[in-house]
Every structure is written in C-alpha cells, then in structure tokens.
Image (cartoon, grey):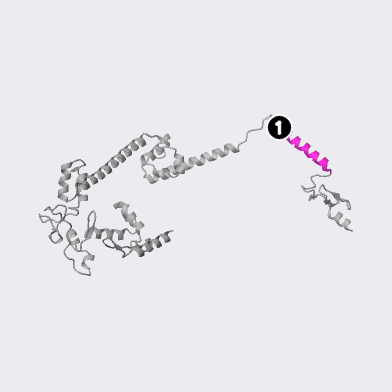
Amino acid sequence: MVKNAWRVAEEVHIRINGEPAPKGFIASAVSERPGVEFFYNKEWLTKYNITSTTKRPEVPGHSYFQKVEKFFEMHYERGELYMEFLKKDCLSKVGRSCNACTEWIGPESTKRTPRPFPDTSPPSHHYLPLEKTPTINVDGSTREPDDFQPRAQLRKRFFNKEIKLGDSEEIEAFSKQYIVGVDLIEEYLQHLTNIELRKLKRKQEKEKLKVNEASKSYSDYDWEKLYKTGRLKNLKVCELDKYVQHYKLTTRKLTKAEKLQLLSAHISQRICQKIISNAKATTSQAPFSQSEHDSQSSSSSEESSSDDEVLNVFGGYSREHDSFGDAIMDEDSDEDDFPVGEITVNRYGRKVGSWRSRYTQDE
C-alpha cells in the first residue's frame, strides 16, 4: 500500500508539473521518502524536543541536536510565518564569531531585505515599496520580528487584554494601524475567544476531576483490574499512596516508579495466594454420606448383574477374551490350560485357542 501511494504521487507530479495555470504554470514536487530524508533520525529529534532540559543528555544524539539548536538560536530570526538566516549574527549576540561564520566559504552577506512596513498615506491597505521600507525603528533600534504582522500582533493584544470582540474603537484603530479589514479582525477575535472558552472548560473539568480523585478512598478502586490491564501507571502519585497507606507497605519516600513496582509485587502476591487457596478448597473432599454409599453399592450391584447376563447370553466369554473375543494370555498361566486340539469359537465366529491347537489342527 505504501509503495503504491508513493508511485501514485510520482505519477501525479509528472502529469501536473509545468502545466499551464490561470496565472502562470504549476510547480509540483514530491516529498522525500522517510528512508532518504536528510533528518533520518526524526524519532530521536522528536524525543529531544519533548524532553525537559535536565533530562536531554539522556536522549541518544543529544550532543548533535544541541549543537544544531544553538546554531539556530544564534543565526536565525524566527517570526510567525518566516525564519530567516542571519550570517554573523552570533557576533551581536555572544560578542564573537562562531566557527561556522569564521570558516564561511561563499559570497559575503549583503544588505538584509526589510520586512513589510505599512504605508499610512492614501489609498489605504497597502505597504511601502521595497526601497523605502525601513530596517530600523525611528529611535534607531532594530525592528522586532512580526512588528507589523497583523495576526501575531492581534493575538498578542488579545492575550494582554488590550482588545476584545465587540470593542469597535480598538478594532477600528487596529485596522488602520496594521492595514487589515475590520471583518477579518472580528473573525480572528472570535476564533481566539472560542479557544479561550475551550481552555477554560478544560481547566474546570480538570479541577473537578482533581476534586473527585481526592475524595476517593482505597475501596473505590478495582486494584486487581488496574494491575491486570496495566493501568496502574495511569494513576497519580496521590492515588498510589492510598494503596500504600491502606496496607502500610512502607513509610519511606518513594518515587512513582518505585511505588508502581511495590504495588505490582503486592497485588500479584495477593492474586497468587487467592489462586492457591481456591485450589486447595476445590481439591479437599468431604466424607461420603450413608445415602451416597448405598446408591454407589446399588449401582455397582446392578452393573455386576448386567455383566452376568451378558456372560450367560454369549457363554464362555470371560476376562480371558478381549472386546473382540480374542483370548488374553496371562503371563502366569501355563500354555497347557488350552487342551491340544480343542478349538473354541467366539461370538464373532473367530477360532480361539493356543498356538499348539492351531498347529495341531493344520496337521
């Protein structure tokens, strides 16, 4: 399935790449496959990013990732919608050039391309041309990233409680300052408001769940089920403490991992003891009553009488014959028990006798 998907993607790329479009031509490309990507260690890079700073040295490849991360911090400027490489920017941040900038092979850095700057002169809703766009502020300081990016600035003001949905004056002023329509501002403010409401609801549900967990006691948990399903690790430390305190397992301070091991060992021991006690209860037999003894005696007598009837019907059939009427020779019996020349027939018509009788018959 995966190979077919990549094959289809390549076919689509070949068909549409360079084809005419309403305003030019279509540019198509196929992303690299996971096996040939430049960052082939995606799994460890993701783990490095989600791990706390103190535990990152335990992640495989942390030295390489840390080196790349420092290079990005010293040489890249990040905005909401862009990330720009700044050659020799490390000189302004740490006071010296790094090895990468010192050993740079290539053309020298040219003047930076300035970010868009709004033009307040009529007509509105447009930006200054490139040659008139400033790279510094009026006071000579460097322009901050996203200083005139409408969405980033609107989100910043919203979380600082400087603007809100329904404040027409602030919305109008923002529209003029950042050259953006009022309808787009109100739409994004509605989106941010919905995010805040969902965040508040999750916070309330989390607090309610926390109160419920605190009110629970030891008996409110099915500990054996949690152990068998492997969900003990999902419990919080305060919940694990309820089991420890109930059985008074220990008084010293333990980590969550140690408490999980302690609970698992104790619960498994209880389960084993329960299984052993149940097995002993089932194997122990109570003495037979007189009625049961009489019933067994009567059933055995009936079986013996029925055997006698069968023997009487077939006559001569005894334990010396198997189920097919063949003679069974006991090891202790002598061969003289079968008289020579005497041939008997079982109920299936087969001749029964010793080897001597057979040879005698043949003679």
Residue 85 rendering spot, x and y as whole percentages: 22, 61
Above or below, comparing residue 96 to residue 166 in the picture: below
Where is the N terminus found, in terms of image quarters?
A: bottom left
Spot the residue most to the front. Answer: 22
Where is the C terminus found, in terms of image quarters?
A: bottom right
Please name whichever residue, 331 or 200, is drawn nearer the observer in this view of the structure.
200
Please name whichever residue, 163 or 221, is drawn nearer the observer in this view of the structure.
163
Please name whichever residue, 305 or 137, is drawn nearer the observer in this view of the structure.
137
Q: Is residue 22 left or right of residue 272?
A: left
Above or below, comparing residue 199 to residue 294 in the picture: below
Q: Is residue 300 magenta?
A: yes
Can you tell which quarter of the image residue 241 is in? top left
Magenta residues? 298-315
Q: Which residue is mark 1?
A: 295
Residue 198 rendering spot, x and y as whole percentages: 30, 41
Q: Is residue 195 visible?
A: yes
Report crowding for label 1: few under 14, some 14 to 19, many 20 or more residues within 10 A (C-alpha).
few
Residue 153 rendering spot, x and y as whole percentages: 19, 49
